[in-house]
Amino acid sequence: MKLFLILVTILLTMNHPMTMLLSVMALVFFLSMIMYFMTQIAFISMIMILLILGGMLIIFMYMISLCPNKKIFLSKKIMTFSMIFSIFMLKIPFMMMNIEMFLLQKIFIYNNMNMLLLLMMYLIMSLMVVMKISKLNSNPLKMIILTYDKQNN
């Protein structure tokens, strides 16, 4: 719970969309780990990661496209805090060995492998479709949608 509060305070101190995106990603990964340990079902935590990060990436990419030339300024306090935090995050797997480490291997057992492969194939296919759509005119996706609407009207 303390780690969750630390991640939230890091998110609140950020002022650039890119650093906010990174802190939200860390927060979602931490929440999915907690959800996995509570429910013992890997599918729910994977779906949570896919849905929340998918939506957040779209929102933050839109925000980043609005201010592309804004530089990231990090203070020494935030850099020191993030270094200490990353060292703490590296030690978490060793702390989890006391909490039945085999639970992490439960994701990759044979029964769940078909669902995991299906999710990976779906993500790869959707990535390829989005890349194909955005490379049609080598324009941003927003411009492609606007030109498509003008052609249909």
Image: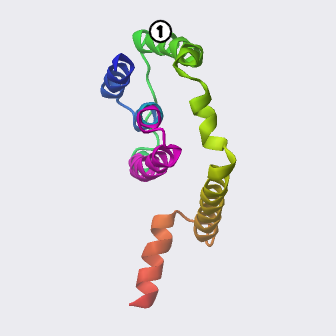
Asked if the magenta segment contains residue 52, the reply would be yes
Q: Secondary structure at mark 1?
A: helix
Residue 87 position, x and y percent, is 55, 12
| Residue that extends furthest to the right in the rendered view of this protein | 110
Residue assigned mark 1: 80
The amino acid sitting under disc 1 is Thr
Q: Nearer the viewer, residue 22 or 48?
A: 48
Q: Nearer the viewer, residue 71 or 80?
A: 80
The stretch of residues the image draws in magenta is 35-63
Q: Is residue 10 above or below residue 25?
A: above
Residue 29 position, x and y percent, is 48, 35
The main secondary structure of the magenta stretch is helix
Look at 52% across and 62% down and name the residue there: 140
Question: For this view, does 88 lie left or right of residue 149?
Answer: right
Say which quadrant the N terminus sits in. Answer: top left
Look at 57% across and 31% down and name the residue there: 103
Count of marks, rendered view: 1
Look at 38% across and 24% down and name the residue there: 7
Look at 45% across and 66% down and name the residue there: 142
Residue 124 position, x and y percent, is 65, 59
| Mark 1 neighbour class, 10 Å CA radius: few under 14, some 14 to 19, many 20 or more | few
Question: For this view, does 70 lie left or right of residue 106?
Answer: left
